[in-house]
Image (tube, helix red, strand yellow):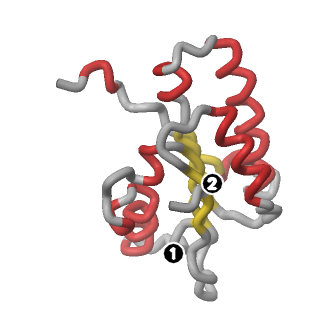
Amino acid sequence: MSAAESAPAPEAGTIPYLALGDSYTIGEGAAPAERWPVQLAALASVQGLPLAAPDIIARTGWTTAELLAAIEASGNQRTDYGLVSLLIGVNNQYRGQPVAQYRAELRELLARATRFAGGQPGRVLVLSIPDWGQAP
């Protein structure tokens, strides 16, 4: 699976959406329609917020550093996303990487997400990693 997936060209009147992350974002093992960013776009549209199908830059196992590298490699220079979501960090924790490294890379990811959103931080949605330590 490609690390960067572009949705079909958005329909006129829809809000461009970019989802950044790891396995939670790409929905490892799930059908594309079951990925949470795809579900979010569909539910928002039903509620009157016409989100386009998301462009996705995500892959199972990625850390913040790997997501930063993938964003660079994607060549995506758009700055017109009406929504950018960011869900990343569980693999930093799983690999035992220093919190200071995560903090610095997350700041850079937030800056990049804000650029994708036209410099408007209010268009960036940051999600916390699930508490997988409580999983059975």
Residue 29: name its quadrant.
Answer: bottom left
Please say if the residues under marks 2 and 1 sit with CB atoms less than 8 Å apart: no
First-in-chain label (2 vs 1): 1
Image disc number at residue 84: 2
Please state the horizontal and vertical placement of residue 120, each as a whole percent of the image.
76, 51
Q: Relative to residue 120, is residue 2 depicted above or below? A: below
Please tell me in which quadrant of the rendered image residue 102 appears: top right
Q: Which residue is mark 1?
A: 50
Against 18, residue 97 (above or below) is above
Mark 2, secondary structure of its residue: strand
Which residue is located at x 59 percent, y 32 percent? 63
Q: Amino acid at mark 2?
A: Val
Counting labels gives: 2
- Vertical side of 94 occupied by 7: above or below: below
Where in the figure is residue 5, as x and y percent of width and height? 58, 66
Q: Residues within 10 Å of mark 1 (few under 14, many from 20)?
A: some
Residue 61 location, x and y as percent?
50, 37
What label does residue 75 carry, if any? Answer: none
Residue drawn at (64%, 33%), measured in percent from left and top? 64
Pinpoint residue 26: horizontal percent, then vertical percent: 46, 53
For residue 131, side relative to residue 121 (left or right): left
Report, in whole angstroms, how far the alpha carbon at label 2 lies from the one at label 1: 14 Å
Determine the image quadrant of residue 48.
Answer: bottom left
> 130 and 81: which one is in front?
130
> Three-letter amino acid code at disc 1?
Pro
Judge by depth and name the residue closer to the eye, 69 or 51.
Answer: 69
- Local secondary structure at mark 1: loop
